[in-house]
Image (tube, rainbow, N blue to C red):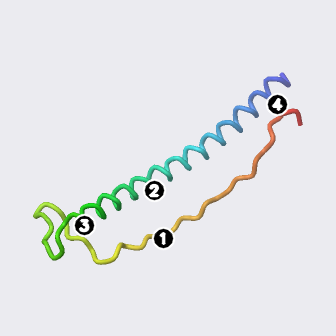
Amino acid sequence: MRKAQEYLEEALMARIEHEAAAEHHAALAAMYAQRIARLKQQIADSLMPYGAAPAPNEPAVLAEPVKRPVEPVVSLPRIQRASDGG
């Protein structure tokens, strides 16, 4: 029974760690999607002659990028597992 309780605690901790990692990876994926869009726009802007109008199916580009609030990063404390040798 005691060993089963240790396995349960270890599984619960692993789940928490993986959920935190998944949130981190989702944030990175969103950041890279924004970066890709920004870089594509910069490349398109550099290829477009100065003063040329954008294509009819593309929105006009703003003079300055929209500032978005930065979300804080939360660091979770590392918890030693019972199976790590104490």
Single out the mark in the foreground, 2 or 1.
2
Q: What residue type is labelled 3?
A: Asp
Q: For mark 1, does the 10 Å Cα neighbourhood hold few (<14), some (14 to 19), or many (20 or more) residues? A: few
Quadrant where the N terminus sits is top right
Tally of numbered tags: 4
- Label 2 SS: helix
Residue highlighted by disc 3: 45
Q: How far apart are the alpha carbons under marks 4 and 1?
A: 41 Å
Q: Which amino acid does label 4 sit on?
A: Ser
Q: Where is residue 74 in the image (x, y as percent from the top left)?
A: 64, 59
The answer to which of marks 4 and 2 sits earlier in the sequence is 2
Quadrant where the C terminus sits is top right
Which residue is at a point 55% across and 44% down the rendered structure image? 22
Q: How far apart are the alpha carbons under marks 2 and 3?
A: 21 Å
Q: What residue type is labelled 2?
A: Met
Residue 53 occupies quadrant: bottom left
Frontmost residue, 66 versus 7: 66
Frontmost residue, 9 versus 34: 34
The answer to which of marks 4 and 1 sits earlier in the sequence is 1
Single out the mark in the foreground, 2 or 3.
3
Residue highlighted by disc 2: 31
Side (left or right) of 16 relative to 23:
right
Q: How far apart are the alpha carbons under marks 4 and 3?
A: 56 Å
Residue highlighted by disc 4: 83
Query: Height in image: 33 above or below 81?
Result: below
The answer to which of marks 2 and 1 sits earlier in the sequence is 2
Disc 4, disc 1: CB below 8 Å? no
Q: For mark 3, does the 10 Å Cα neighbourhood hold few (<14), some (14 to 19), or many (20 or more) residues? A: some
Single out the mark in the foreground, 4 or 2.
2
Which residue is at a point 54% across and 64% down the rendered structure image? 71
Residue 38 occupies quadrant: bottom left
Residue highlighted by disc 1: 69
